[in-house]
């Protein structure tokens, strides 16, 4: 069975969500997503990463569109974020410095248990304030994925160090080295081995809940993707590709959906699915990028042609459609040429055979066999006619009239090759013609005037030094 048919059969068996079920899944999605964000930002290491992102955006090294979550990346949202960045960044840096100082004080031997609890409460309070500052900018969560993976590796290392210090006695020097490494990692993460392990486990659990809710909401609306994709068939992309692109748009709609606004999810997702499919068709329709302005002009010409056909004209010409669209002819011609679809020369012509387009195109670089024979005969007769001349006379005529490589040289160039004056070259040339006339060879050459030597356009013209080496042996 065809894979597409199997897929369509499978999604047809997935029941649709009722309004109550949709609200329930959307609430679960929002709750797990917000919980995941809060759990991720509750780590000082992640807050340090967030501070670096805000600093890069403030310095112009990262765009606000790339920094902020897609839900807040409109023009008004970016302007608000730009106003908040300087103050939020400065306050965030200060809070993190104080947390670093207080966490180092937790290990002081002079601190009582009550003092340590008080320090820890201050650290937690600053973290919550720092989270609020970061959430006002609403950075995208994928920026922290690399930091989370690094924290996971650090947590495993801290657990191994703690186990090595507690399970078996070690030499004094080795134990001190292990303790120093563990202390360094704890100060860097501002977490103990157990607290970091528990926080990362909670983050993983919340992320799984979030992914499950996303999967549930998207899976129950796959039939919507198929119904929309079928309307875009015969537009240069297969139905399977259209469904794939529409599914990507569906996932974007899941991430941006806000059920509190009162809209049904299918109504909201339809726009994103259509947007993803339309953009994919535009990208795949042109192998070479076509500017949006050119695409818009082509659309105007097509619309004008359709209006002319509806008004009674059978088949308007391109010139008539361009004139009806009100576009300058040169601009419309350029846009229409760029909108043509290119074809690969290696693409098979039919499904039955292996013949490609390139096999049916003439290779103009190849010389016709009959022409090659005529050229060889012509060269041979010219050489026979020039045998009455001396070597220098024959060489000068070959260079002067391109009898050797198809390129004619000037008197100055020939003089430089043979290291004589131009006047001397002219004298040798005249003497050579006199010899040809006296020997009767000129009559043989005049008979070849109607069969000139074909030009050798593909051969590069030799430099005078190369030619000198060939004719005189002097490099």
Image (tube, rainbow, N blue to C red):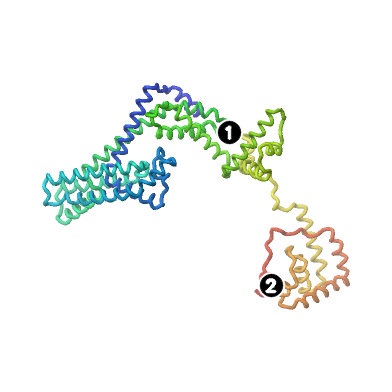
Q: Residues within 10 Å of mark 1 (few under 14, many from 20)?
A: some
363 sits left or right of 142 in the view: right
- What is the quadrant of the C terminus in the image? bottom right
Residue 183's label in the rendered image is none
Q: Quick check: 345 above or below 181? A: above
339 sits left or right of 417 in the view: left
Quadrant of the image occupied by residue 248: top left
**Residue carrying label 2:** 468
Residue 274 in percent (x, y) is at 50, 32
**Residue carrying label 1:** 235
Q: Residues within 10 Å of mark 2 (few under 14, many from 20)?
A: some
Q: Secondary structure at mark 2?
A: helix
Judged by depth in the image, the label closer to the viewer, 2 or 1, is 1
Residue visible at 67% across and 68% down in the picture: 463
Residue 361 in percent (x, y) is at 68, 45
Q: Secondary structure at mark 1?
A: loop
């Amino acid at each position: 069975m065809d894979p597409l048919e199997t897929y369509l059969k499978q999604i047809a068996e997935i029941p649709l969500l009722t309004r109550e079920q949709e609200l329930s899944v959307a609430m679960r999605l929002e709750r797990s997503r917000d919980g995941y964000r809060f759990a991720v930002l509750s780590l000082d290491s992640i807050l340090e990463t967030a501070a670096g992102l805000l600093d890069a955006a403030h310095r112009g090294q990262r765009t606000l569109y790339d920094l902020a979550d897609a839900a807040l990346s409109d023009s008004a949202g970016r302007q608000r974020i730009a106003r908040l960045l300087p103050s939020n960044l400065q306050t965030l840096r200060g809070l993190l410095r104080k947390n670093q100082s207080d966490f180092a004080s937790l290990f002081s031997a002079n601190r009582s248990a009550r003092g340590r609890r008080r320090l820890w409460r201050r650290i937690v309070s600053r973290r919550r304030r720092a989270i609020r500052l970061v959430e006002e900018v609403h950075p995208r969560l994928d920026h922290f994925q690399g930091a989370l993976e690094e924290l996971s590796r650090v947590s495993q290392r801290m657990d191994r160090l703690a186990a090595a210090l507690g399970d078996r006695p070690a030499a004094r020097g080795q134990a001190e080295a292990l303790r120093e490494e563990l202390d360094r990692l704890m100060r860097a993460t501002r977490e103990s081995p157990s607290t970091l392990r528990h926080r990362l486990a909670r983050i993983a659990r919340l992320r799984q809940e979030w992914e499950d809710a996303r999967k549930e909401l998207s899976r129950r609306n796959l039939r919507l993707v198929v119904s929309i994709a079928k309307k875009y068939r015969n537009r240069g992309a297969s139905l399977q590709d259209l469904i794939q692109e529409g599914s990507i748009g569906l996932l974007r709609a899941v991430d941006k959906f806000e059920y509190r606004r009162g809209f049904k999810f299918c109504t909201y997702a339809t726009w994103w699915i259509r947007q993803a499919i339309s953009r994919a068709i535009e990208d795949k329709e042109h192998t070479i990028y076509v500017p949006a302005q050119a695409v818009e002009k082509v659309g105007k010409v097509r619309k004008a042609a359709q209006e002319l056909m509806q008004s009674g004209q059978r088949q308007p010409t391109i010139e008539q459609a361009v004139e009806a669209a009100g576009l300058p002819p040169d601009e419309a011609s350029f846009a229409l040429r760029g909108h043509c679809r290119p074809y690969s020369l290696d693409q098979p012509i039919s499904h039955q055979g292996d013949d490609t387009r390139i096999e049916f195109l003439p290779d103009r670089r190849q010389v016709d066999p009959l022409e090659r024979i005529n050229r060889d005969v012509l060269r041979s007769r010219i050489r026979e006619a020039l045998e009455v001349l001396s070597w220098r006379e024959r060489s000068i005529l070959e260079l002067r009239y391109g009898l050797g490589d198809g390129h004619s040289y000037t008197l100055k160039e020939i003089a430089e090759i043979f290291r004589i004056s131009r006047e001397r070259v002219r004298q040798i040339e005249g003497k050579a013609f006199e010899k040809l006339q006296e020997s009767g060879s000129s009559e043989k050459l005049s008979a070849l005037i109607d069969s000139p030597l074909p030009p050798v356009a593909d051969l590069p013209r030799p430099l005078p030094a190369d030619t000198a080496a060939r004719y005189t042996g002097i490099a």
